[in-house]
Amino acid sequence: MRFEHPDRAPRHLWTLPGVPLFHAAELAALRARFPEDIAGPDVQYGRAERAHGIPNQVGVYTDEWGCTWEVLQPGVIGEVKRAPLDDWAALAHYRPPDEILANADFGQVNASCAQSDRFILAGTTVRPFERMQFVRGTEKLYVDLAYGTAELLTLRDMVHEFFLRELALWMRTDVDGVSFMDDWGAQHRLLISPQMWRELFKPLYADYVTLIHSAGKFAFMHSDGHIAAIYPDLIEIGVDALNSQLFCMDIEALGQAYRGKITFWGEIDRQRLLPFGTPDEVKAGVRHVRRALDDGAGGVIAQCEWGNDVPMDNIAAVFEAWLEPKEWSTDLKIR
């Protein structure tokens, strides 16, 4: 994170819900072989009054904001099918789930930090654009954005204020970093115009980063898709580590423009390489990333996501390749 020439890139493995459900033994074996350098703290958010049902199982469940999700396959998150603000008339009486913050138990967070020699990264529920989609409905929210609907700003500000209160809880703890997220990219470009993004959403992330930095912590952000248009904005507001789908973009161009200015928090192609590639192809993909981004100074994290249908051997290949000496001038580039 400070570009102090570490001996290797730190390891960080993400798993989709189906992996611990259906591949627990393989997961334990992989983590024993490649211990992670980043861990989460021991925390418990409060019970949500509107939540019911079981997430990630076939059927329906309702989350803490009152959004009803449908799951068609075990081990996946599903999609929102009933949005509480489908009709803007409901906005007048709609409230965020303040009870999950008011009744949160942060009592063990500092102890879990003190007992670990790993980097402790707090995961949060902070995802303003996605949460707005969940509570309004994706199609309707895009129409609101196009027409500049006044209620859109009311909802944005409500969601933002809730997330600022959530982050404030983490600022009083000993965690090393705090993460937030929003998926902003389609396959080849941003989901909305960069100008609209800068006007409506960039200020929110700037607030989050400022708050996180004020407590001496690192700010981590995740965003899927092709987000090259807003990389400089995220660097400008001070995001320390960014997780993005590198293989949707020009990895060499990202490295040339931003290496040394931000930490690339993974990742390895989970659209094609990890589910369908061979271990050798996966290793070539890691080498491609390292050629472009890893100059030995730091600023890279060996992160990948283990999807439900990804072979364990391909995940092992990721971490094996990150331990290789950086000498691959003749390797085939994977795009």
Image (cartoon, rainbow, N blue to C red):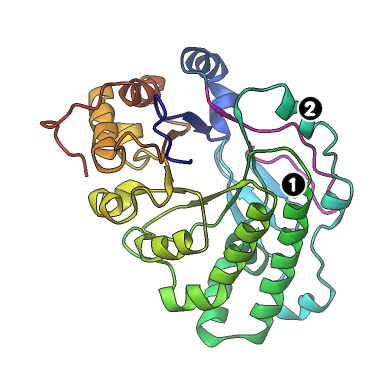
Position of 308 with respect to 317 (left or right) is right
Placement of 310 over or under 177, stated as above or below: above
* Residue name at image x 77 percent, y 76 percent: 91
* Residue 185 is covered by the magenta coloring: no
Dominant secondary structure, magenta: loop
On the image, the x and y values in percent for residue 229 come to: 36, 66
Under mark 2, the amino acid is Ala
Q: Magenta stretch? A: 36-57
* Residue 52 is covered by the magenta coloring: yes
Position of 79 with respect to 328 (left or right) is right
How far apart in space, not on screen, are marks 2 and 1 (Cα)? 14 Å
Placement of 265 over or under 283, stated as above or below: below
On the image, the x and y values in percent for residue 7 come to: 40, 24
Position of 269 with respect to 238 (left or right) is left
Circles 2, 1 touching at the beta carbon (< 8 Å) = no
Question: Residue 289, located in which quarter of the rendered image?
Answer: top left
Under mark 1, the amino acid is Trp
**Disc 2 residue crowd, few under 14, some 14–19, many 20+, Cα 10 Å:** some
* Circle count: 2
Q: Could you say which is closer to the camera, residue 89 or residue 3?
A: 3
Q: Is residue 277 visible?
A: no
Q: Could you say which is closer to the camera, residue 45 or residue 307?
A: 45
Q: Residue beneath label 2, please?
A: 111
**Residue 170 badge:** 1
Q: Quadrant of the C terminus?
A: top left
**Disc 1 residue crowd, few under 14, some 14–19, many 20+, Cα 10 Å:** many
**Residue 248 badge:** none
On the image, the x and y values in percent for residue 41 come to: 70, 33
Q: Is residue 290 visible?
A: yes
